[in-house]
Amino acid sequence: MLRAAMTCAVARPSGAWAETGNGLSHNAEAIHQEVSFSSSPMRIYDAVTRAEQFQKVVLLSVARSSVDVTSKPAEISGEPGGIFVIFGGYISGRQIELERNQSIVQAWHEREWAPGVYSIARFELREAGTGTKLIFDHTGFQAGAGDHLATGWKINYWEPLAKVLGEWA
């Protein structure tokens, strides 16, 4: 059983495609998830931003059963502007902002998306007692992908990350 508490939401306004005359969309989906870990922000930051540590997360993820995650191990740059390629190349992107032990912002792309289409994944790490509250927001992905992505974050990031950190009871 996972000791880390998880809450998540996929926001999607009701109604069909809604635009005002100035091109403003009123139906964009967004994911907001909050996950509590007993590990420090430093341990979580390192597990997400260091390739050798994140590959351990990948190998415990549900994605390993549908994507070849071993032939192309995780590559993760620790520098803003650097690239990352994870889950056997199924996910790739760029590090936009890296604030050590505090936040990670990534331009994030799934292999099945059209070339040049990226979303924004934002990880905020807040100390919570002796542990960490990870506040996660994912925006800018195509309409209809929210449920798939929200589930993916839980089963391919948060649950295996808790196992890697030794928080799986």
Image (cartoon, grey):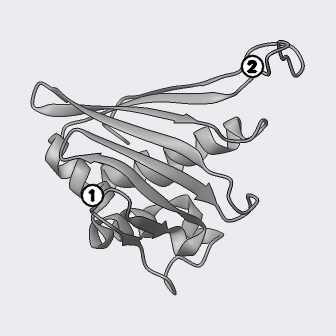
> Looking at the rendering, in which quadrant would you find the C terminus?
top left
User: What's the residue type where badge 1 is placed?
Assistant: Ala
Residue 164 in view in this figure = no
Is 122 situated above or below 133? below
Instruction: Locate residue 132: give its quadrant.
Output: top left
**Disc 1, SS:** helix
Residue beneath the point at 68% across and 59% down? 116
Q: Position of residue 70 (x, y in %)?
A: 49, 82
Residue holding disc 2: 24
Residue 152 appears in the figure: yes
Q: Residue at the bottom extreme? A: 71
Residue on which disc 1 sits: 47
In this view, the residue in front, 134 or 49, is 49
Q: Position of residue 83 (x, y in %)?
A: 43, 66
Q: State the image quarter where residue 84 is shown.
A: bottom left
Crowd class of label 2 (few under 14; some 14 to 19; many from 20; radius 10 Å): few
